[in-house]
Amino acid sequence: MKPIRTRTARAIAVAIVAGSLALTGCSSNDGGGKGKSDAKSQKDAAEQQDPVAYGDAAASTGPAQDVPGAKPGGFINVYMQSDLTHMDPGQIYVSDAGQFANLIHRGLTNFQEDEQGNLTVVGDVATDSGQTTDGGKTWTYKLKDGIKDEDGNPITSADVRHTIERLYSKVIFDGPTYIQSWLSGNDYRKALPDGPYKGKHLPDTVLETPDDKTVVFKFNQPRPDLPQALAMAGYAIVPAKQDTKEKYDKAPAALGPYKIAEYKPGKSMKLVKNTQWDPKTDSVRHQYVDGYNFSSTVSQPSQTKRLISDQGEAKNAIQFTDSVDPAQMADVVTNPETKKRTIQGYQPYVWQLTFNLDRVKDKKIRDAITYAIPSQSMVQADGGRYGGEIAGGLLAPTLPGFDPTYDPFGKLKKPNGDIEKAKELLKEAGVKEGTKLTYAYSNTPRGQAQQVILKDALEKIGFDVQSKEIDRASFYEQVGKLNNPYDLYMTGWGQDWPSPSTVITPVYDGELVADGASNYSHINDKQVNELIQKALKQEPEEAAKTWEQAHHRIVEEINPAAPVYYSKQIQLFGSNVGGAKYSTESSYIDINDLYLKQP
């Protein structure tokens, strides 16, 4: 989500390394009988499928609507297990960094969310969500007055051009690639290999900045989703004067309501108010608190324990992208007072066991492993019914047109796997007992617990599993390398906005097999590629059928990634934190509306 890699419920992406779990939660973390009917269901997920509206200039004009009862002052404490993956907008495509981006970065557009979770794309640095007169091939953006970076430098169209063009350079190896590929093709880097750093630029036939206040995107086919793509953190503005290339990832310049005052990598970070941010230019964010104190060394069990106790500094604290510790879930959901201090929702992510197709080439072996996965145990290790539910396919319940009956591997009928079927397939494939498999996993509690479950299941069907632990902060970077040494790895992906195009294209398009890309399996199937190109040129209703066809071929005929479970979210916050609600846009606590009840 994108990555999970968040990468987002509408804006992140959809690949995440979010939440985690404890091994002790694998056997009994459901929370007992109380509250059994209040975990989020697919009916709740369906409410998150509503199409996104595009806002006009009035909707894009600040200040943001006041949060009832909000007070100014104080610092919110933020609990995290590890450091942010990135702070440079161009590198941001993972949930924690996407959540952080809303505090310090601003893009041309952003998502505005109402109390019911309905989303509208509004102008952020731009005056509106964008204007097109030719069906989406050409989009024009006018910039607001009064937008400055933290040092008071005005933001102009040259900064927007710089932001887009730097994504073509080797400085940027992570992050979304939608707009670059729409402008210049899948091998877009060839169009501007040094980015803007040696004085060259994209031609005006692609990206035009006729004056300081105007930016024009020109595509060779309609791109009606551009306003949503621009709202992703990965396309937030990097002022040309502030760009320090690789160093920018550790010290970015703020345009949003907060700026970095102090950063100790791997330990902590302090955000304070950005005095150059003008609320009259921002219809999404607030600046109620004086700042945020991030601690990136607090484990998920410790976060949960502190927030359950609700003592001292924990009263002013939130979980950022981690979830309630599965081992302590019962203590949260069975205590009415504690449960009041939770936010819950369906995430857009599907957790899947991804196969490296360069190494696991036989489909019968991939199918055997898929049948062997004990999906129910994997869900239990991530919070039980509050953490997820068994997946039949690779598209989440939050996507329009989701089919809850789709289950080609029979996971709903045999939630703890089909070992006999798996052994039968391996016998047909001629796989010898003791064949080695290398499994890479993230060093989070969840990753460690699920590694034990998967290793046990795969050893039952005869594999010798070599487990390789990777640091959470660099996990997707490592498995994103084409020449990585791993056979299997758990990855998560969710839509970048409500369309299968933002799942199937980045993750399963063979044209996007590259270092740093999100095609983690390296699938390159001619028929899938053709279906993707066909769907991208169709109207949404017609495209839905084509996406379904592509999805079925991917899951049933190729199987590059075994569906394991759909992800849910439950997070805790302290009793002195006000304005806390679930965000359909981020799939975490809504970071834009928080304040302290007693500053």
Image (spheres, helix red, strand yellow):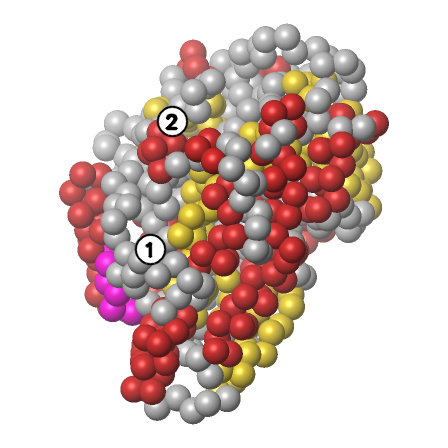
Q: Nearer the viewer, residue 553 or 397?
A: 397
- Which residue is most to the front? 33
Q: How many marks?
A: 2
Q: CA distance from mark 2 to mark 1?
A: 44 Å
Q: Quadrant of the C terminus?
A: top right
Disc 1 on helix, strand or loop? loop
- Of tags 2 and 1, the one toward the viewer is 1
Contact between marks 2 and 1 (CB within 8 A): the answer is no
The mark found on residue 130 in the picture is: 2
> Can residue 164 be spotted in the picture?
no
- Report helix, strand or loop for mark 2: loop
Q: Nearer the viewer, residue 279 or 10?
A: 10
Res 513 → quadrant? bottom left
Q: Earlier in the sequence, mark 2 or mark 1?
A: 2
* Left or right: where 364 falls relative to 372: left
> Residue 332 location, x and y as percent?
63, 35
- Which residues are drawn in magenta? 550-558
- The residue that disc 1 covers is 412
Q: Is residue 99 above or below residue 417?
A: above
| Residue 494 point in image, percent of width and height | 43, 47
Magenta: main secondary structure = helix
Inspect the image, locate mark 1, and give the three-letter code of the amino acid beneath it. Answer: Leu
